Image: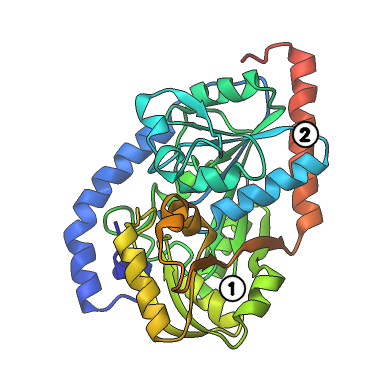
Amino acid sequence: MRAPAFWWSAKPGLFQRIMTAILTPFAALYGRMAARRMGRSGSRVSAPVICIGNFVVGGAGKTPTALRVATWLKRAGETPYFLSRGYGGALSADGGAHLVDERRHGAAQAGDEPLLLARVAHTVVARDRPTGAMLALAGGASLIVMDDGLQNPSLRRDFALAVIDGAVGFGNGRLLPAGPLRAPIELQLQHSSAALVIGDGEQGRAAAALFEAAGKPVFHGRLAPDANAALHMLGARVVAFAGIGRPKKFFDSLEACGARLVARHSFPDHYAYRPLEIAALQRQAEALDALLVTTEKDMVKLAPFLPALRQDLPQPEALPVTLVVDEADDLRQMLLDVVARFRGAGRLSGEMKI
């Protein structure tokens, strides 16, 4: 599903106001259901759980954030396991928990985001988070980094970092389906430990102000393209395509690298590409004398049929990005403090359970 444009407008026009009015009763019902769900108590496991989530549907930068957090923790001597729902993959459909194996699993089995996560640390996909956590602990996890799940109360979190896209913030501030919010802002704020605003923008600053008013830390970051890839894009003609939450963010990143976008194609988040679609993009790139560029997340979905593509046409290539946090030392120390407090509390109480 592609998010409707009116979700992201802080200054709605007439059409947007009409759509919001029509959908508001459904949003009120959804809000009550979300509040009831988030009010449930979750299972406690015998390792710290760090949740990387966001308030709205679509991409805010959760996966790059989870990757950065896990990298910090590994350098500190921890053994983090990622825990993901595995959206779009078949592995989690059976209700069980599965360890992602890059050698055997593609995006159709594991989901696109878990394949990216598995490049950095062991990754478990499970629709039921406690079941997934138990598999991670059995495998030797010293802590769990949960990719998404801020609105899922089934597993108790020790730290919840809310990732905010600085360009759009909380959109129009309305609940699904009248807006992009997954639950009421006040409730999500209550369940968050801190915020990370990625990129700059008026709406992102407004969202950060809510955290600051609640006395919760706010960190700032940006997604930086790989230096070699950025140099490759400098001055190049590019046919760009992306199936992520907000494709415009990817297109803007390419232009920031100095690429000349001669065509851009937006697909829904987690889109399952077909070989014929990629072949058509190849032909367009050839006709326009351009590179064919997509995101890393999209690239993992293309892997199964890349060898079958025409090799005499432009091949899809990715623009890798990494998260740079302005206050990296402060956020890293906060996470390590959470881990230390958890273990101290466990030793004192002797009540931690798997």
User: Is 304 positioned to the left or the right of 234 in the image?
Assistant: left
Amino acid type at image mark 1? Asp
Instruction: Name the one closer to the observer, 308 or 288.
Output: 308
Mark 2 burial class by Cα count in 10 Å: few <14, some 14-19, many 20+: some
Residue at far front of view: 312
Please name the residue shown 62% across and 84% down the image: 234
Between 74 and 339, which is closer to the camera in this rendering?
A: 74
Which numbered disc covers residue 200?
Answer: 1
User: Residue 115: which disc?
Assistant: none
User: Which of pointers 1 and 2 indicates the residue nearer the eye?
Assistant: 2
Q: Position of residue 48 (x, y in %)?
A: 68, 29
Residue under numbered circle 2: 78
Q: Residue at x 81, y 43 (%)?
A: 75
Q: Which of the two labelled residues, at mark 1 and mark 2, occupies the earlier sequence position?
A: 2
Q: What residue sits 60% from the left and 62% below the top?
A: 197
Classify 10 Å Cα crowding around label 1: few (below 14), some (14-19), many (20 and above): some
The quarter of the rendered structure image containing the N terminus is bottom left
Q: Position of residue 210 (x, y in %)?
A: 55, 59
The answer, for residue 89, to whether it is visible in the render is: yes
Q: Secondary structure at mark 1?
A: loop
